[in-house]
Image: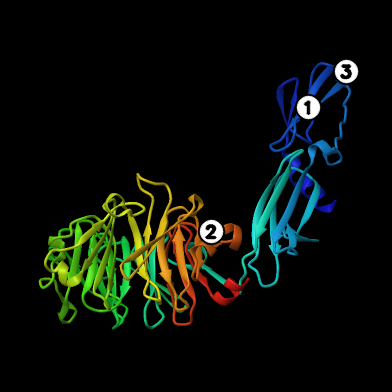
Amino acid sequence: NKLMQEHFNEKYMESEKYANSTFSGKINETIDYTKDGTYDVTLKKNLFFDSTFTVTVPKDQKINISIDFSQNQRMLGQLFVESSPVGAKIFINDSNTNHSTPFTFNNLLPGSYTLELKSEGYKDIVYTAIIESSKKVNRKFVLVDSSIWSEYNILDHGIEAEKLTCITADHNDLIWIGSRDGLVLYDHGTWRLYNPSNSYLTHTVVHDLSVTPNNELFVATQAGFSIVVNQEPLIRYTSAGGRVAAQATGFPSDVTYGIYAENGFPFYFATEKGLGAAKEEIGNYFLDFSSETPHLFITQFLTCIYYSNSDQEIFAGTKGSGLIKANRSELLEGEFTILTRGTHAMPTNSVSDITDDKLGNIWIAFIPDVTTTISTLVSYREGAFQQFPLSTGDSRVNKIFVDSRNIKWVGTETGLFYFSDNVNNRKYLNESTTGLKLEKVNGITEDSKGNIWISTFENGLFQIKDVEKLINN
């Protein structure tokens, strides 16, 4: 076996040898002793079984010992490689093995092997396999379909931010990504990072993004929000103002977790101390916060916000206080309803996201709290709530997005799933089904070509380039 012999010649000569429990140097060396006698010699090397043998040395004579461990089955290991789909060509240490998955490699000397799988139309896989004596390594790989998926990360693609938090596409197909390092712009192959030191962004930690009908981008951060116009953060807002280019909102908190500006005025802002609103633009992107003051009434810790222009209904998710529902005109008078687990049989008292679909249903993600360990999707239409409890394997729901096909995409801590009409017919996208580390999904959006973009907290950005092929596979 040429592969095994090359590996043996290169690596095993680094073994150590011991005589009568005393370290006596490296292999392929001479041990000098002043006395004749019988010695127990042990060869030791990481990943190999120890090998001990007895040598009798006559006086004033030299004994040469040669041991070929490649002929000792107990010293060797195995590597089983399979893939989905099957038929990927297997390369080891840059050499074509002329084998395809699935295949078992026998009689491998212990050590580190660089394994590479290649299949036309799929992303190459590179993996380091560690072989030990008398052990079998089993590895199954899911190949990433390059016709469906694109992947962007800080290491290989210069995304400029590591921990992503949210994502949206504007009307010019620019992809905007929130992160803990600032606001990232992906402009058809080029990246740009905005932060407070190079722009009027209010804080490096971005919580939410919302695009107005006029293609202005609202950026919710840990310290207020900014408005981006023509790819530049033009003005910023904080509760008290006072900073350069910073206007005052009068909100009780700067920590803004959600903004709803998609349908135009009024704009709504979910903060950690209540609900803010801007009724209209006075001019030059200066907003009027005095005409509507819901923050005087709704003071809960808000996580997200949704507003329906058609029926003027407001839905606000909270952290631990339930779902807030209000009519805009009634809210002006301080009237609203808090729906909780105890008062209205809501699944939990914590909400992570709210959106609507093409049929007028509003979708609400209730997440685990002290009362339950599972997430529940709830749809609301014409005064009626319908609950869809998820399984424990679905984990916490972070994001709901409905695309132009009316497909619902749901991002969770453990992956992503989607469905058209029936939640129970959902299909899962995670590492075991796609080969991609789709974990901690916190943002989903769609561009004008129908491509789906997905942000994750630790594993970068993903794009579904062929949704039809994905859902029909």
Number of numbered discs overlaid on the protein picture = 3
| Disc 1: which residue | 31
User: The residue under label 3 is which amino acid type?
Assistant: Lys
Comparing 411 with 310, the one in front is 310
Above or below, comparing residue 346 to residue 331 in the picture: above
Relative image position of residue 156 (x, y in whole percent): 52, 65
Seen at 79% across and 25% down, the residue is: 41
| Mark earlier in primary sequence (2, 3) | 3
CA gap, disc 1 to disc 2?
52 Å
Q: Is residue 38 left or right of residue 148?
A: right
Q: Distance between the residues labelled 3 and 1?
A: 14 Å
Q: Which of 355 and 34 is in front in this view?
A: 355
- Amino acid type shown at disc 1: Ile
Gap between marks 2 and 3, in whole Å?
65 Å
Front-most of residues 415 and 230: 415
Please name the residue shown 39% across and 46% down the image.
372
Q: In this view, does 420 lie above or below 340?
A: below
| Residue that numbered label 3 is attached to | 59
Q: Which of marks 1 and 2 is in front?
A: 2
Residue 108, relative to residue 380: is it above or below?
Answer: above
Residue 20 occupies which quadrant of the picture? top right
> Percent from the top left, x then y, of residue 43?
76, 31
Q: In which quarter of the image is residue 23?
A: top right
Q: What element carries label 2?
A: loop
Q: Is 243 displayed left or right of 52 in the figure? A: left
